[in-house]
């Protein structure tokens, strides 16, 4: 205060005071007038009410902003393979631990460390044996993660924070830095005011205190949100990268068929224009269960699933399957998995290359022990590959027309409320198959596949297949990624070598 006084000079200070005095006098004069008019108590009441309402409104706005921030949290991607679950847990833990007091926003170096910690948590999860797993990341990949995370964070901030398009992080930090200086000046002002008007000063003191606290809380909240989102975003893209979904060359991995599918499409006599990678649906089951009949029934007409010779090496016979609402698909007929024509090794390869499995089980053949053993092995193979999603599995129970009484066949049958002996037996068969094969009842569909007696295929089985298409698409995506990454490594290496050559020769 003294310094200011000296700097401005006495006379200048006097001029300033004279200039400000009439305005400053308005407050005490007004209060005096209110007192004279006996309206001071009303004015005080209005002051209390207005302050209260203003405070309430501000609280509400604050809460609304907080809600906005809560809604704006990055979550794991539903298309990730099971292996990513653990990595996401690590990222979430790190995000929860990020405290505003540990990570000031005006220190770029600290923020970089926080981002690196997130990368490190994911890298450590995918390479637990490496001493410094972060070194496993190539430079272009690290840059790609940071670029994606920043781009997303920018979009989120623009969408969720009011005025953020005009605010920089520096602004926020600076505003906070000024707070101390401002507070010092405010204290001088407060003390002076207390002398002039004790009642008003007291109220505004309380109000100011509350407001100060509210703003302080909002700022801390915002800071914490930014830190958490930053960690989550970096973690998210690191997982995308490690599960192979983030590729350097970009593009949709399922846009072109894999070499295996290209071969199968040719064998399925599909001469149409080249499509993307087809969905691979595989029909499995014992010999004579009705696998070929099921494929015929799915086609809706008899396309003779037997007139194409099976591949002698894989035992698979591909058909091009088309249906309204289904993406391009190949359906594969297989020899009975209980026969010698389909060895364990071949079966495993078939299962790992499938996006959707249809298991056909005959209702009138009660011994399902062998079938259960094979199915358990299939489930084991599916679960082994954590970096891939397991293909969904549907069971079609065939030969339901041969259940007792065998002569009776008068569909449709209401299985929820069976009215006849046949309906009751079909329902019981579904429950038994579900228990024998350890499959949820909802995934078990009774069908009749005998020529001229096709039942439950068009409506129920097709609906179930279409319902599982989304999941099957995700399986297909990850399956294509592996293929794609293999191809990418070669393409990049070739390009880098060519560039290096040009540089050396140039
Ligand atoms: N009655 C009846 N016969 C069926 C049914 N499904 C298949 N079949 C017959 O069972 C036999 C074996 O069927 P197929 O589709 O060749 O079995 P796959 O060896 O599993 O391919 C054929 O004679 C079919 O007509 C069904 O639901 N009911
Ligand atoms: Mg067959």
Image (spheres, helix red, strand yellow):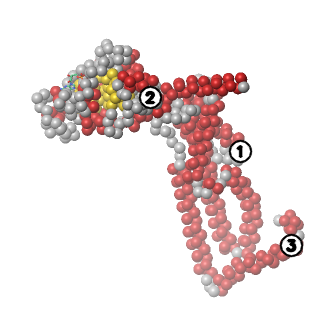
Q: On the rendered structure, is 113 left or right of 18?
A: left
Q: On the rendered structure, is 29 left or right of 237?
A: right
Q: Give how far across and how far down residue 122 sits, in percent.
A: 57, 33
Q: Give how far across and how far down residue 166 sits, in percent.
A: 64, 56
Residue at the location (74% across, 76% down)?
24
Rendered image: mark on residue 257: 2
Q: Give how far across and how far down residue 426 sits, in percent.
A: 20, 32
Residue at the location (58% across, 72% down)?
50
As helix, strand or loop, the secondary structure at mark 1 comes to: loop
Q: Earlier in the sequence, mark 3 or mark 1?
A: 3
Quarter of the picture containing the C terminus is top right
Rendered image: mark on residue 367: none
Report if residue 231 is visible in the image: no
Q: On the rendered structure, is 429 left or right of 51?
A: left
Report if residue 49 is visible in the image: yes
Disc 3 residue: CB within 8 Å of ligand 1? no
Instruction: Decide which of 163, 321 is in the foreground and name it.
Output: 321
Rendered image: mark on residue 107: 1
Which residue has dot 3 on it? Answer: 12
Outermost residue to the top? 340
Q: Give how far across and how far down residue 205 sits, in percent.
A: 67, 67
As helix, strand or loop, the secondary structure at mark 2 comes to: loop
Q: Quadrant of residue 171?
A: bottom right
Instruction: Decide which of 325, 498 is in the foreground and name it.
Output: 498
Looking at the rendering, the quadrant in which ligand 1 lies is: top left
Q: Which one is closest to the eye, mark 2 or mark 3?
A: 2
Distance, label 3 to label 1, CA atoms, is: 42 Å
Q: How many marks?
A: 3
Instruction: Decide which of 358, 205 is in the foreground and name it.
Output: 358
Rendered position, 109 above or below 360: below
């Amino acid at each position: 205060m003294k310094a200011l006084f000296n700097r401005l000079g006495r006379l200048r200070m006097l001029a300033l005071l004279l200039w400000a005095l009439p305005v400053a006098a308005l407050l005490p004069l007004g209060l005096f007038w209110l007192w004279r008019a006996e309206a001071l108590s009303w004015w005080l009441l209005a002051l209390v009410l207005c302050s209260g309402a203003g405070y309430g409104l501000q609280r509400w706005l604050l809460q609304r902003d907080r809600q906005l921030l809560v809604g704006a949290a990055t979550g794991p991607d539903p298309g990730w393979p099971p292996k990513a679950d653990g990595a996401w847990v690590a990222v979430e833990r790190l995000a929860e631990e990020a405290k505003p007091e540990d990570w000031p926003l005006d220190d770029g170096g600290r923020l970089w460390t926080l981002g690196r910690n997130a990368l490190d948590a994911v890298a450590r999860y995918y390479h637990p044996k490496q001493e410094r797993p972060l070194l496993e990341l190539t430079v272009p990949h690290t840059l790609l993660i940071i670029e994606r995370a920043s781009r997303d964070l920018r979009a989120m901030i623009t969408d969720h924070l009011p005025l953020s398009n005009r605010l920089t992080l520096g602004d926020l930090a600076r505003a906070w830095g000024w707070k101390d200086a401002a507070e010092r000046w405010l204290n001088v002002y407060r003390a002076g005011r207390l002398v002039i008007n004790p009642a008003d000063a007291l109220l505004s003191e309380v109000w100011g205190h509350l407001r100060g606290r509210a703003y302080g809380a909002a700022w801390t909240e915002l800071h914490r949100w930014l830190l958490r989102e930053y960690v989550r975003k970096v973690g998210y893209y690191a997982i995308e990268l490690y599960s192979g979904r983030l590729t350097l060359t970009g593009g949709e991995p399922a846009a072109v068929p894999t070499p295996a599918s290209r071969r199968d499409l040719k064998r399925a006599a599909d001469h149409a224009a080249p499509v993307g990678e087809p969905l691979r649906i595989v029909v499995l089951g014992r010999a004579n269960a009705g696998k070929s009949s099921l494929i015929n029934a799915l086609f809706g007409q008899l396309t003779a699933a037997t007139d194409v010779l099976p591949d002698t090496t894989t035992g698979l016979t591909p058909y091009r399957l088309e249906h309204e609402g289904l993406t391009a698909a190949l359906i594969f007929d297989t020899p009975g998995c209980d026969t010698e024509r389909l060895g364990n090794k071949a079966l495993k390869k078939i299962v790992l290359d499938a996006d959707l499995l249809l298991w056909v089980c005959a209702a009138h053949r009660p011994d399902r022990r062998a079938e259960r053993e094979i199915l358990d092995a299939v489930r084991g193979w599916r679960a082994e590959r954590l970096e891939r999603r397991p293909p969904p599995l549907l069971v079609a129970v065939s030969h339901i027309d041969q259940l007792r009484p065998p002569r009776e066949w008068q569909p449709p049958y209401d299985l929820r409320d069976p009215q006849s002996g046949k309906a009751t037996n079909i329902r019981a068969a579904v429950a038994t198959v579900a228990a024998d094969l350890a499959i949820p009842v909802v995934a078990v569909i009774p069908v009749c596949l005998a020529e001229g007696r096709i039942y439950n295929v068009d409506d129920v089985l097709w609906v179930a297949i279409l319902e599982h298409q989304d999941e099957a698409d995700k399986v297909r995506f990850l399956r294509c990624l592996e293929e794609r990454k293999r191809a990418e490594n070669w393409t990049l290496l070739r390009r880098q070598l060519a560039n290096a050559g040009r540089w050396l020769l140039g």
